[in-house]
Amino acid sequence: MSKNNKNNKPVEEEIEIFEFVDDEGNIEKFEILDFIEFEGKDYAVLLPVTENEDEDVQVHILEVVEELDSEYDTYIGIEDQETVDKVYAVFMEKHKEDFNFID
């Protein structure tokens, strides 16, 4: 589970890097590619930031849970692979002109 300021959602065409802290205290950097609403829930599609531009990276999809008593949203890993696949399919369809998707 990670937290991120919910007021810092990226503006279209603007690349923003977010730092997420995992349950073990490790800091990881991600670019948020998009927010997808699917079956009544919100999901973030994240691209890990790496030093090596030639490195193959996979996107991560996390559920976004709004915290009513906090200025931060909570990002939760999804255990159901079928849900991940469906959200990714929505993302691919939405951005088929923007990215070169490979299997």
Image (cartoon, helix red, strand yellow):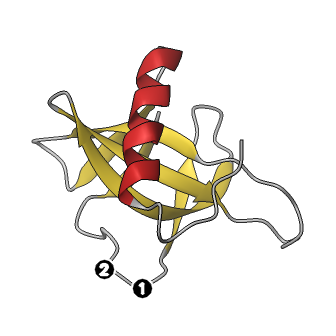
How far across and how far down the image is residue 39, in percent? 19, 27
Q: How many marks?
A: 2
What residue do we see at 37% from left, 43% from top?
90
**Which residue is the extreme one toward the bottom?**
14
In the rendered image, which quarter is residue 76 located in? top left
The picture places residue 87, in percent across and down from the top left corner, at 39, 36
Examine the rendering and report whether any part of residue 61 can be seen. yes
* The C terminus, quarter of image: top right
99 relative to 9 in the view: left or right: right
Instruction: Find out whether the residues at labels 1 and 2 contact each other: C-beta distance under 8 Å.
Output: yes
Q: Residue at x 18, y 40 (%)?
A: 67
Q: Say left or right for 23 vs 52.
A: left
Q: Of 7 and 100, which appears nearest the observer?
A: 100
Instruction: Establish if 18 lies above or below 58.
Output: below
Taking the spot 61% from the left edge, 48% from the top edge, the residue there is 59
Q: CA distance from mark 1 to mark 2?
A: 5 Å
For badge 2, the amino acid type reads Val
Nearest the eye: 38 or 46: 38
Q: Nearer the viewer, residue 39 or 47?
A: 39
- Residue 62 seen in this snapshot: no
Query: Can you tell which quarter of the image residue 74 is in?
Result: top left
The local crowd at label 2, few if under 14, some if 14 to 19, many if 20 or more residues have their Cα within 10 Å, is: few
Q: Going by the image, does 27 lie left or right of 62?
A: right
Question: What kind of element bears circle 1?
Answer: loop
Q: Which of the numbered marks, if any, corresponds to residue 11?
A: 2
- Establish if 41 lies above or below 20: above
Q: Position of residue 100 (x, y in %)?
A: 64, 63
Q: Position of residue 37 (x, y in %)?
A: 23, 42
Disc 1 marks which residue?
14
State which quadrant residue 62 falls in: top left
Q: Is residue 67 left or right of residue 19?
A: left
